[in-house]
Image (cartoon, helix red, strand yellow):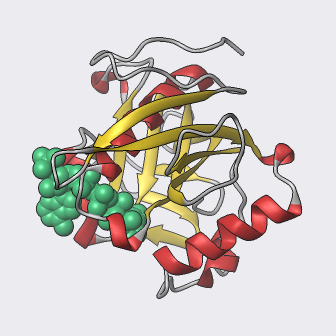
Amino acid sequence: MSSGYGAADGAGFVSHDGVIHERLPDAGGGAVPLRWVVRWETQLDDAELARIHAFLVRVFPDHPGGVQAAWAGSRPELRLLGFADDADDSTEGELLAHIGIARRFIRARESGASVLVGDVGLVGVSPDRQGAGLGRRLMHQTDAVLADLGVDFGTLTTGDSKIPFYEAVGWHLASNRLHAIDLWNRRETFDGPFFIRPVRAPLSAWPTGDLERNAREI
Ligand SMILES: CC(C)(COP(=O)(O)OP(=O)(O)OC[C@H]1O[C@@H](n2cnc3c(N)ncnc32)[C@H](O)[C@@H]1OP(=O)(O)O)[C@@H](O)C(=O)NCCC(=O)NCCS
């Protein structure tokens, strides 16, 4: 795994076993320290998982599958975690933002071609910090992690109310019909918004027609 790479706007970069510090402007003209930490799933101990779980329960109080189903039921490969202070590479402190990513192949039904994607989920900002630009920072750092993972595209499924957010942060609404496995382990044809983000491949390389995500959402 590479040690990281620069971000276009100079905001820094995440390395996979590292940490990045930046500052989030606040409403009062000041700036809140922000620390991004990437953790592979097998690095997280029980106490860290408990803290993440408590955060996700606050961010997703009404998730249809329950946070346990989405989180413990289909765990990501790694998490990008945003904390509210300048401490070193730890997962102590106030957790402000969270994302999970798992690499997998999306299969084009007609051609049989497979595309390596980083499937993104559990995108959350602490309820008392939402609407202040933190989600944008989270998605910016997610771009860096996706690039470091070497995937062609990022993918995510979401609800209609989140379309403006993902469009605002540069993701593209895909028009494919997506066949997948739902939170209750039944096959489904996902009928909500399905977003893609070009990473190593150009947008024009995204396959057309019916696609299969032979797995549950992250
Ligand atoms: C969705 C979420 C991650 C967004 O994070 P956030 O910190 O509130 O978003 P930001 O303040 O960084 O907004 C980023 C951009 O999206 C836009 N945006 C966000 N929500 C929007 C909405 N509902 N309608 C229109 N624009 C929206 C903002 O205007 C902003 O654009 P700008 O920078 O050009 O002004 C956060 O609100 C959240 O955790 N919600 C609850 C959990 C959830 O639904 N997660 C998504 C699951 S798929």
| Residue shown at the point (27%, 18%) measured from the top left | 9
- Tell me where residue 127 appears, x and y as whole percent: 38, 73
Q: Can you give x and y, in whole percent of width and height, for residue 84 in the image?
A: 49, 51
The x, y position of residue 161, in whole percent, is 23, 72
Say if residue 208 shows up in the picture. Answer: no
User: Can the viewer see residue 163?
Assistant: yes
Question: Looking at the picture, does residue 134 appear above or below residue 104?
Answer: below
Q: Residue at x 42, y 20 (%)?
A: 12
Q: Is residue 151 above or below residue 62?
A: above
Q: Nearer the viewer, residue 120 or 99?
A: 99
Of residue 63 and residue 81, the one placed in the foreground of this image is: 81
Classify the position of ligand 1 by quadrant: top left, top right, bottom left or bottom right: bottom left
> Where's residue 129, x and y in %?
34, 64
User: How many tags in the picture?
Assistant: 0
**Quadrant of the drawing holding the N terminus:** top right
Q: Residue at x 25, y 70 (%)?
A: 160
Residue 117 sits in which quadrant? Answer: top right
Residue at image point 63% right, 71% down:
70
Please state, as top left, top right, bottom left or bottom right, where the C terminus lies in the image: bottom right
Whether residue 172 sits left or right of residue 51 in the image: it is left
Is 59 positioned to the left or the right of 204 in the image?
right
* Side of 161 where 157 appears, left or right: right
**Between 196 and 56, the one nearer to me in the picture:** 56
